[in-house]
Image (tube, grey):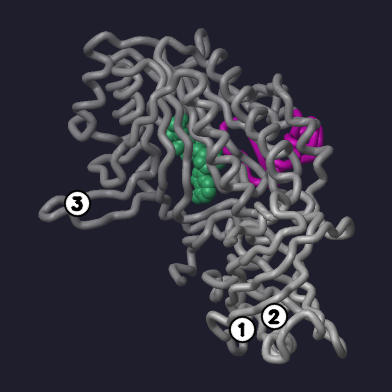
Amino acid sequence: MKTTINQVKQYEGKTVTIGAWLENKRSSGKIAFLQLRDGTGYMQGVVAKNDVSEEAFQLAKNLHQESSLYITGKIVEDKRSPLGFEMHVQDIELIHEAVDYPITPKEHGTEFLMDHRHLWLRSRKQHAIMKVRNEIIRATYQYYQDNGYVKIDPPILTASSAEGTTELFHTEYFDEEAYLSQSGQLYMEAAAMAFGKVFSFGPTFRAEKSKTRRHLIEFWMIEPEMAFVDHEESLKIQEDYVSFLAESVLNNCQMELKTLERDTSKLEQIKAPFPRISYDDAIDLLKEKGFTDIDWGDDFGAPHETAIADHFDKPVFITNYPAEIKAFYMKPAPGRSDVVLCADLIAPEGYGEIIGGSQRIDDLEMMKERYEQHGLTAEAYEWYLDLQKYGSVPHSGFGLGLERTVAWLAGVEHVRETIPFPRLLNRLYP
Ligand code: 4AD
Ligand code: MG
């Protein structure tokens, strides 16, 4: 019977065959202990000299790390292992002998590991991070589908910018110039006018010359957009969604969180409602905390965000930023033309901005005015202006960065380990 490691509990006392790689081994005299992995889990195979052919025993003793094999044996309970079971091996069939696998159990430098990312993904920690990522992806689809949103896929190749022109990736589009999408938002606004509540989940490109633990050149963003939903209602959706992600990871990634040595008490605190602080008050708070390098009108840097986040024991919304430092499409706050109805959600523990969101301008004249102020030409956005011309309604939306969320929930220092093949300022390989 062929099965996988995550299924072996169904086969206690029975003989099964598993396709696996050798993660590690130790042997002495008449016994060899093989640490096996098959992608679904980890299991120990015990090879006793008396239970197998001489050929199979010699093979077990001489196997190299990452060699692939079909291994057959009896599944027996083993209370000491995290899996709860091990295999008493009866036969081993070598599929492929791996020689001099470059990633050994000793410590390696980050650049070396990044150069071998295609192999590094096999390591336990990386495997656990990708499983957490997968759980966040799964829970995202569940959350939006269960709450009546329609998934809409905005284009990747675009003719105009959504978030400012300095970070665009240029590419040829026959005899036109095109950009890689830096946000699907404008298209999602069109979709919200057709379907009410929509969400997208796709790759996003930012030619940002930032080399920090929070920046990728290519990352994945979830962008919900809702018609007839104001800023305040949007914040409730955001905190509910993020709480659901934390709960899903806590419930469904217990083994992974253990592998990652994540302090799960921190994740248990991620429960709606989240505190809110206005940009005005955040500036005052920073001044009280002794920051002299920031004034009203400046954007926050990582140290500022971290200082504000440290003031609360949950993720915090910083609301109503100055219009000048935010995107053109954000709606001014009532009675305050200098600030806009927006919020950034800042994660605790220094993970920074997870979500950027806002209520959108729904008035044609105001939108045209904002184009001018932001130095954009209204012609490039002709189709977008149609949304304000034909049945414009109050609407809001936001974007959650997948990799920053994975880093935060998994407790990983740098976003480069939260995406299978990171694209960084100095890295397009592998
Ligand atoms: O704040 P941003 O730029 O917002 C938008 O793009 C809006 N159009 C979203 C919307 O309202 N539909 O980006 C949203 C999130 C950030 O909060 C952050 O989590 C993530 O995307 N993000 C990045 N993640 C990794 N690397 C980068 N370079 C990122 N830039 C933004
Ligand atoms: Mg932002």
Disc 2 crowd rating (10 Å Cα; few below 14, some 14-19, many 20+) is few
N-terminal-most mark, 1 or 3: 1
389 to the left or right of 223: left
Q: Quadrant of residue 60?
A: bottom right
Disc 3 is placed on an element classified as strand
Give percent across and percent down for residue 51.
Answer: 78, 80
- Number of numbered callouts drawn: 3
Q: Residue at x 69, y 74 (%)?
A: 23
Above or below — where is 244 with respect to 48? above
The residue identified by callout 2 is: 104
Inspect the image, locate mark 3, and give the three-letter code of the amino acid beneath it.
Glu
The residue identified by callout 1 is: 101
Q: Quadrant of residue 37?
A: bottom right
The residue identified by callout 3 is: 177
Inspect the image, locate mark 1, and give the three-letter code of the amino acid beneath it.
Tyr
40 to the left or right of 227: right
Q: Nearer the viewer, residue 120 or 192?
A: 120
The stretch in magenta equals: 285-312
Mark 3 lies within 8 Å of ligand 1 (Cβ measured) = no
Disc 1 crowd rating (10 Å Cα; few below 14, some 14-19, many 20+) is few
Disc 1/disc 3 C-alpha distance (Å): 44 Å
Mark 1 lies within 8 Å of ligand 1 (Cβ measured) = no
Is mark 2 in CB contact (under 8 Å) with mark 1?
yes
Extreme residue toward the left, this view? 175
Disc 1 is placed on an element classified as loop
